[in-house]
Image (cartoon, rainbow, N blue to C red):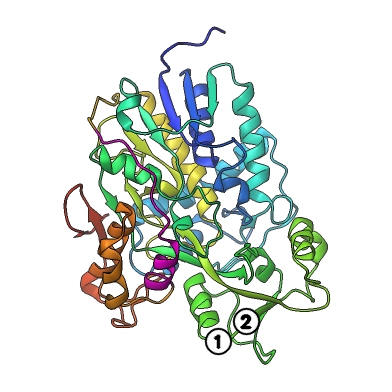
Amino acid sequence: MRKKLHPDLAVVGAGVAGLTAALTAADGGASVLVLAKGAIDSSNSWAAQGGVAAAVGPDDDPSLHAADTLAAGRGLCRESAVELLTREAPERIAELVDLGVEFDEGLAREGGHSRSRVVHAGGAETGRRIAEVLAARVQEHPRIRIVAGKRVDSISSLAGQPVILATGGYAALWERTTNPRGATGEGLLLAHGAGAALADLELVQFHPTALLDDGFLLSEALRGAGATLLDEDGERFTDELAPRDVVARAIAARDGASLDLRSIERDRYPTLMATLARAGYDPADEPIPVSPAAHYAIGGIVTDLDGRTSVPGLYAAGECACTGVHGANRLASNSLLECLVFGRRAALAALDGETVSDTGSRCLTPSPDDGAALWRNAGLIRSAAGLERLLDAPSELVRLIARSALARTESRGVHFREDFPAEDDALAGHLVVHPGGDPELERWS
């Protein structure tokens, strides 16, 4: 068919959330333009080793999945978002199978889950396997056009159509990270510049087991399969399947930690084992040195459960969005699920939604590298003294993160303040930043 010069919908980002949104809208009859900052196979989704959580086992139920998600979220989860996420999960898995994703046999159990409910593909290659299938379907769809290597400088440049931002998170701002270097939160600044609110910026999950040398992620699936964490004396020191914030701080409290893979079926994870071999390690012979790294941005652009932001015609889905579904600590393998569920819902809403007007939003300028300062002052363990040093950072997003972290004068989930080590019931809400304003506490139902 002939391509329309002006599409019915623009999707910014080509990870699982963006590809899901594009396919959903195109299948609904819309013409879709997908804009990707890099190559279509360079998104964070392609690097996602974890699986997709869904209550598809005979001993499981979405209500149990929801209960585990709420427990991990430490009182900050938006319960309506959790109910929706867990209820829709089985159907989203079935759709992937229909599209051609081949999942491994059996279900895995990961940290914080009370049941084995995580589906994997290719061992620890789930993100890549899903993204490959979605990308193939997008590329062959007659109503979708993809433009790779296109950087969007302002929302105004996309005026006249609904826009879905699926630009990923901002964990690559930290010096030690599991993320591709492009995950620096540009979508958040685009939305904020157009007038959208941001929330929960202080809530960044640090993955417990990244390779000490370079931050390469060693999937939680390994611990789910029986890998153990050992201290400097070779002794096991924690429950490997506790929520990630608990495991990460237990590792950080040691002089050194390593992940022992000798007892597991390593041939189930060929890509991981090959990467370790190239790095000079023999996982069959020795434990692998690990330490935490910035991994997942819980905070993002405030949306409702259909991806709507506070800017008419502007939607967001995936890691760049903040629905409140993860609370203060994302449950393992809920992130790819979030992309599938909310990417689809944002597209359905955008089909009948308003178009973006010329907001006059400022152009986005690349953020300078504040990685070392962020790691030092807003890492796994924080204090007011360190966070205050970031208030003059060149990067606007770094300053917003610091302001939000200073406002959360408690320790909850992934956010740990050594000067406020306990939870404060008065802060059981979301810190929302409107353009030009200070973080304000809101409670979402």
Q: Main secondary structure of the magenta part?
A: loop
Is residue 373 highlighted in magenta? yes
Q: Left or right of 389: which side holds 318?
A: right
Q: From which residue to which does the magenta span run?
A: 361-379
Do the numbered discs 1 and 2 sit on residues whose CB atoms are within 8 Å? yes
Quarter where residue 264 is shown: bottom right
Whether residue 245 is visible: yes
Q: Left or right of 285: which side holds 429?
A: left
Q: Secondary structure at mark 2?
A: strand
Most extreme residue toward the left is 437
Q: Amino acid at mark 2?
A: Ala
Q: Residue at x 29, y 54 (%)?
A: 199
Give the label on residue 53, or none.
none
Does residue 162 sit above or below 20 in this rendering? above
Quarter where residue 445 is shown: bottom left
Q: Amino acid at mark 1?
A: Arg
Mark-to-mark CA distance, 1 and 2: 7 Å
Most extreme residue toward the top is 2
Q: Which residue is mark 1?
A: 254
Q: Residue at x 54, y 75 (%)?
A: 242
Quarter where residue 424 is shown: bottom left
Q: Secondary structure at mark 1?
A: loop
Q: Which residue is mark 2?
A: 257
Image location of residue 320, percent across then percent down: 41, 47
